[in-house]
Image (cartoon, helix red, strand yellow):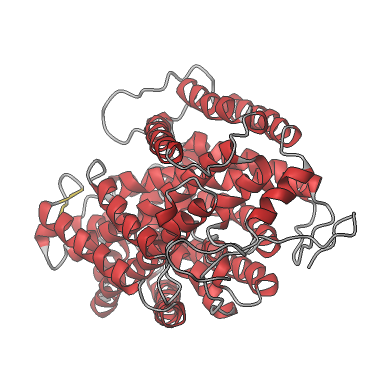
Amino acid sequence: MATEATGVPATRPADVGLRREIGLIGATWASETSIIGSGWLFGAYLATVAAGPAALYGWIIGGVCVVILALIHAELGAMYPIAGGTARFPHLAFGSIAGISFGFFSWLQAVVVAPVECYAVMTYGSYYWHSLFNTTTGHITTTGFIMTIILMAIFTALNFLAVRMFARINSAITWWKVAIPVLTIIILLFKFHPGNFSPPGGFNPGGMKAVFAAIPGAAIVFAYLGFEQADQLAGEVKNPKRNLPLAIIIACLLGTAIYILLQVVFIGAMPPRELTHGFAGITNPVVIAGPFAGVAGLAGLAFWATILRIDAFVSPFGTGMIYQTSTSRVGYGLARNRYFPQAFQWVDRNGIPWFSLIMAFVFGIFFLLPFPSWNVLVVLVTSASVLMYSGSVLSLGVFRRTLPDAERPYKIPGAAVLNPIAFIICGLLIYWSGFTTVWKLGVCVVIGYVLIGISMAFDKQRPPLDWKSATWLIPFLIGMGIISWQGQFSGESSKAPPLNTGHIHFWWDLGVVAVFCLVIYYWAIYTCLPREETLELIARQSGHEELPDTGLRH
């Protein structure tokens, strides 16, 4: 246990009712099964349609961005291994207002992923059951919607298993999920056409603007999401000081390598006859509904195409299942902070936050209604995730300033430089997602504020509202919206007129985002909670209070 400068042993936040039963492999696979989900099934196709073979640049840039964010989460997770950590770090650094906001961003991105993965299953499954997905509109059908709800119910039921048994099931699924993409890379290398890297329109038909837009818009960042899942389950990881940072770093590096190689072989293995109008001109419905399986089938690998369609169920299934887990833990963590109703803290005899788990299922269904396709939901998830990551980046900057002597089993090198860069990365990823996505996310945020406000109004033990330490938050959210509105990225995939004005010219816009983010970053660090108040918040979550309605103690 760390010792503060005063000589008093430092209190560490802890959780009540959760059991530490997940080891290094289980924690690594919790992140890896989230990284290798439906993103690998569609990401390479969408990226090449958006940017041509230059999509490779997008995967490399996205990979570097995610590795930096992963290193930050590795330090935070080992420092404070608490359930739903990404939702709770800003609470410790900035108090209730920022905690409410970033906690909701974390919960929002997590609750939407299970529906996304279900949509992926329906899209690939339409090869055998045509009524699941309409290839003309690109939307899930009524039958697909019903089957999606059933699949989400299965995710929820499996999450009621004891943590140890759940980790074993997830580990077995993840071995499959990693093996299939790796074997796909090897097999498709034997069908490689080097000329595909110079198709009609050239290597980089849309320039770097198209590459940047593809990073969030074509599911590149979404594919990389999930490295933080070990953080979300930190309250159930054995020896978290060692296992958490290792799990996050291993999972992230492995996922980055797999995705870059998958993009290479997807470009190379596409039959040249399908590229008469470049990658943006692909019209074959077999490729559109199931890109890698379609390419394998067109290349004469019918057996492997069948395996990939089986994997199109297994991979999203594993990712959807683990995100259903993490959503319940984020809800649990927000209830611990007294932002969500206290019922979200209720755990059963197996240590499962059962009410939070059921609510994850209910709200997941809610998000199916206005977002009828995989790609539409993906962009929303990506933006919400990046907002969540930005809170963790700011939290690390605060902890380095106010708690320099706290115990850090893993310490990211060069944080004074890397941390502000990471915050700029978050700003750019939000900006590149386009104004259409940004305003929709803004609506979700406003609705979230209203619901949480109602919940807290009836909680007599709600925390005081720390407005002073969050004066930068509203300017950050509104400022990003204005820059996006005036910038170059619309985020609109249809033929509807773009909502952004384009007044800020390309390349200048990136500088505007960078400068704005630096101002917000140092403003936030300057106005954070004093050291004493952060230590008091940590002490309140040291895990010794009694659980509501359970009688269990830590």
What residue appears at the point 63 percent right and 69 percent down from the top-left corner? 244
- Comparing 66 with 270, the one in front is 66
Q: Is residue 72 left or right of residue 6?
A: left
Q: Quadrant of residue 144?
A: bottom left
Identify the residue shown where x is 39% and y is 78%: 173
Residue 545 in percent (x, y) is at 58, 62
Looking at the rendering, which quadrant does residue 466 occupy? top right
Residue 375 position within the rendered picture, expressed as x and y whole percent measured from the top left:
32, 48
Would residue 34 appear left or right of 290 to someone viewing this image? Answer: right
Residue nearer the viewer, 208 or 381 = 381
Q: Quadrant of residue 148?
A: bottom left
> Toward the viewer: 251 or 152?
152
Q: Is residue 225 above or below residue 207?
A: below
Q: Quadrant of the C terminus?
A: bottom right
At horizontal 71% and vertical 37% (from top left) the residue drawn is 528
Q: Is residue 397 visible?
A: no
